[in-house]
């Protein structure tokens, strides 16, 4: 019941010919084919990059955390103030 029968396809083709015209359909099909080839090549390239990234990350040392993920060490017992609380020497 859900499958398209041959006469359904004929109606779809007739609608496309009426909407786009017989002259524009080959150009549209050609550009669609080029787009699909580009899309497939980009997908393959992304998959290859993902595999190479996974292989290199398992071999490499663990990444250092970014600034927002760093844990601030508590102030030393000597009474020195942490660097974040010290006045900026550039503005003085």
Image (cartoon, rainbow, N blue to C red):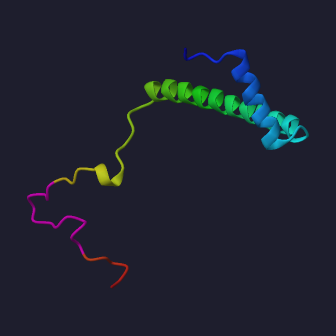
Q: Main secondary structure of the magenta part?
A: loop
Question: Looking at the picture, how far across and down is residue 76, in whole percent?
Answer: 13, 57
Is residue 47 rendered magenta in the image? no
Q: Nearer the viewer, residue 40 or 65?
A: 40
Position of residue 6 in the picture relative to residue 90 (left or right): right
Q: Nearer the viewer, residue 86 or 52?
A: 52
Which residue is located at x 26 percent, y 77 percent? 87
For the C terminus, the quadrant is bottom left
Position of residue 88 in the picture relative to residue 45 (left or right): left
Question: Looking at the picture, how far across and down is residue 58, in whole percent?
Answer: 44, 25
Is residue 76 rendered magenta in the image? yes
Residue 20 occupies quadrant: top right
Question: Looking at the picture, how far across and down is residue 8, in whole percent?
Answer: 69, 22
Magenta stretch bounds: 74-86
For the N terminus, the quadrant is top right
State how many labels appear.
Answer: 0
Which residue is located at x 86 percent, y 38 percent? 27
Position of residue 53 in the picture relative to residue 41 (left or right): left
Residue 44 occupies quadrant: top right
Which residue is located at x 87 percent, y 34 percent? 26
Q: Is residue 39 above or below residue 82?
A: above
Q: Is residue 2 above or below residue 87?
A: above
Q: Nearer the viewer, residue 47 or 62?
A: 47
Residue 28 occupies quadrant: top right
Q: Residue furthest right?
A: 23
Q: Residue furthest bottom?
A: 92
Question: Looking at the picture, how far across and down is residue 14, in whole percent?
Answer: 79, 32
């Amino acid at each position: 019941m859900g499958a398209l029968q041959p006469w359904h396809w004929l109606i779809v083709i007739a609608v496309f010919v009426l909407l786009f015209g017989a002259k524009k359909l080959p150009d549209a099909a050609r550009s669609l084919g080029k787009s699909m080839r580009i899309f497939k090549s980009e997908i393959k390239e992304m998959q290859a990059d993902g595999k190479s990234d996974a292989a290199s990350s398992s071999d490499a040392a663990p990444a250092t955390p970014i600034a927002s993920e760093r844990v601030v060490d508590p102030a030393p017992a000597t009474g020195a103030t942490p660097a974040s609380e010290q006045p900026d020497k550039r503005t003085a």
